[in-house]
DNA sequence: AAAAAAC
């Protein structure tokens, strides 16, 4: 009868220490893999890794419901390395296949294999569009243990006979929900039909919508189902804000915000590729260190721009939604939405690029007065209003009652808006005192993710516990994948990032701002 | 409406 002892223990240490944390070394991975993990400084697997790896090693199919920031990638790459390490591949017959929705994600997975497979003699190939097919064929001819592919190029090459999937006994379908969104499911079905039914399948999705469930039932046999919550550190560390300005003021407002000292590096999302180009050129013209990323750019440029941005050679990345999900950029301080996304879910995906691994993140959006419905959709999805933000020197606008004027005949769209007058635009709070950069937050330890072992619990019931700022920062929560992680989906797990105070940007006007706007 | 992915 000595509960105080236990209490003292939990009080002194992080709460999750009450349960012993799993170690990578307990997972039964071979020495060369374990050594690579050690060298990267990881000791504790994330919940999805701890749960999935033993089942994958057992040869079971796995249905993983997890976002990117949970360490999902390593939960399949590590055991795959283990399984494949026994033998070698034959020409044109890859032994395993990983399907990814975008080329950038495929590259990220490939990097994962390079990191963890450095002491093994396995090889991998990246099979994606936009790059020379001859080269890829040649690599395939030499024999590939791990093939990482986007669907289009894989099918193309298969139909040209450059590839046999008869020896492929391990299939990973990653980001299934996104594959669905992008209309890849027929392709995936086709690819799966080219594989032997005698295979092990690992299927990952951020959400488990009925349609995804149907696919899982179709592709998997008696899978071990694993669901993990989003990393707890993510939700609470993103500060959001919304600036409503005239269309013509958007670029100027953005520049003001980008000049804030708190901006270490930033992704700026646009809704259209050509707006990415325009904004990118404008920022460069104004002296910003910026790059552009969208699907119409040559593949070599896409990868090298992303690398430069990750390496810190570029401070700002202007991009389309090609980079909205899954892309992992460590330590991103800011996400800006130059346009509010058309789909509210995309907002959550976009801003999930920041505020990871316990670091504070900022997600600021620009809207025109006509974007009220887009903003409302986001706010109702997340359940939180986006605090309005003032940018000094920029005229703040109220919401318009009109829909966005489109191609000459702006339809009124008032049909179901009969309560319009009763619900005036959200008031803007000009009374907020200016707050300097979030120095208060920087001076105290970053919040530590406390949810290492809580994984399989239902997500919605988690009580919001106050930040325990007394606890020292510890980096044990970061899994091998993702360097701190990003958020890919959200399911019914809505981030609570909106409870932070408004803040005002105070940036000295610069000469060129006064001089007027170059196109 | 837009973006992504094959040539």
Image (cartoon, rainbow, N blue to C red):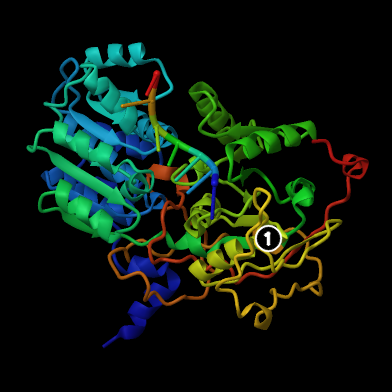
Disc 1, SS? helix
Mark 1 neighbour class, 10 Å CA radius: few under 14, some 14 to 19, many 20 or more: many
Residue at image coords 23%, 57%: A213
Considering the image in quadrants, where does the C terminus of chain A appear? Answer: top right
The residue to which callout 1 is attached is A370
Work out whether residue A260 can be spotted. no
How far across and down, in percent of the image, does residue A471 sit? 51, 66
Q: In this view, does A346 lie to the left or right of A177?
A: right
Q: Considering depth in this image, is A400 or A150 the residue closer to the camera?
A: A400
Relative to A12, residue A55 above or below: above
Quadrant hosting residue A512? top right
Residue at image coords 41%, 32%: A103
How far across and down, in percent of the image, does residue A190 sit? 21, 35
Considering the image in quadrants, where does the N terminus of chain A appear? Answer: bottom left
Farthest residue, direction left = A198
Q: In this view, does A459 lie to the left or right of A504?
A: left
Relative to A176, residue A5 above or below: below
Relative to A395, residue A193 above or below: above
Residue at image coords 33%, 48%: A180
Chain holding disc 1: A
């Amino acid at each position: 009868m000595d509960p105080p002892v236990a209490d003292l223990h939990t009080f002194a240490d992080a709460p999750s220490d009450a349960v012993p944390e799993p170690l990578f070394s307990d997972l039964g991975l071979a020495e060369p893999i374990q050594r690579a993990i050690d060298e990267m400084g990881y000791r504790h697997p994330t919940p999805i890794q701890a749960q999935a790896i033993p089942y994958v090693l057992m040869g079971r199919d796995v249905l993983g419901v997890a976002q990117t920031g949970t360490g999902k990638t390593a939960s399949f790459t590590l055991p795959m390395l283990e399984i494949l390490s026994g033998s070698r591949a034959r020409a044109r017959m890859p032994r395993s296949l990983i399907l990814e929705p975008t080329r950038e994600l495929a590259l990220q997975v490939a990097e994962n294999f390079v990191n963890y497979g450095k002491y093994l003699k396995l090889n991998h190939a990246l099979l994606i569009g936009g790059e020379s097919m001859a080269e890829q064929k040649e690599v395939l001819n030499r024999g590939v243990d791990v093939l990482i592919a986007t669907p289009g190029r894989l099918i193309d090459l298969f139909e040209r006979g450059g590839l046999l999937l008869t020896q492929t006994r391990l299939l990973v379908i990653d980001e299934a929900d996104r594959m669905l969104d992008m209309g890849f499911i027929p392709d995936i079905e086709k690819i799966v039909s080219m594989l032997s039914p005698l295979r092990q399948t690992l299927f990952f999705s951020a959400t488990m919508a009925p349609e995804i469930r149907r696919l899982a039932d179709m592709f998997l046999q008696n899978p071990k189902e694993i669901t993990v919550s989003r990393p707890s550190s993510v939700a609470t560390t993103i500060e959001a804000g919304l600036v409503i300005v005239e269309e013509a003021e958007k670029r100027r407002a953005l520049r003001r915000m980008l000049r804030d000292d708190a901006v270490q590096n930033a992704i700026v999302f646009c809704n259209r590729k050509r707006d990415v180009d325009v904004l990118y050129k404008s920022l460069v013209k104004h002296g910003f260190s910026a790059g552009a990323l969208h699907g119409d750019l040559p593949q070599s440029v896409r990868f090298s721009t992303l690398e430069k941005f990750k390496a810190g050679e570029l401070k700002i990345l202007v991009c389309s939604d090609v980079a909205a999900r899954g892309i992992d950029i460590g330590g991103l301080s800011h996400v800006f939405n130059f346009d509010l996304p058309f789909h509210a879910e995309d907002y959550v995906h976009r801003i999930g690029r920041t505020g990871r691994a316990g670091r504070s993140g900022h997600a600021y959006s620009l809207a025109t007065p006509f974007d009220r419905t887009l903003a409302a959709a986001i706010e109702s999805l997340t359940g939180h209003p986006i605090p309005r933000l003032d940018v000094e020197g920029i005229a703040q606008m109220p919401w318009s009652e009109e829909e966005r004027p489109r191609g000459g005949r702006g339809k009124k769209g008032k049909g179901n808006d009969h309560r319009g007058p009763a619900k005036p635009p959200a008031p803007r709070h000009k009374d907020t005192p200016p707050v300097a950069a979030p120095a208060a937050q920087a001076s105290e330890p970053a919040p530590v993710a406390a949810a290492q072992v809580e994984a399989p619990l239902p997500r919605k019931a988690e009580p919001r516990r106050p930040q325990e700022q007394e606890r020292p920062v510890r980096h044990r929560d970061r899994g091998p994948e993702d360097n701190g992680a990003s958020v890919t989906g959200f399911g019914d797990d809505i981030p609570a990032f909106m409870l932070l105070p408004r803040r005002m940007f105070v940036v000295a006007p610069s000469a060129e701002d006064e001089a007027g706007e170059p196109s």
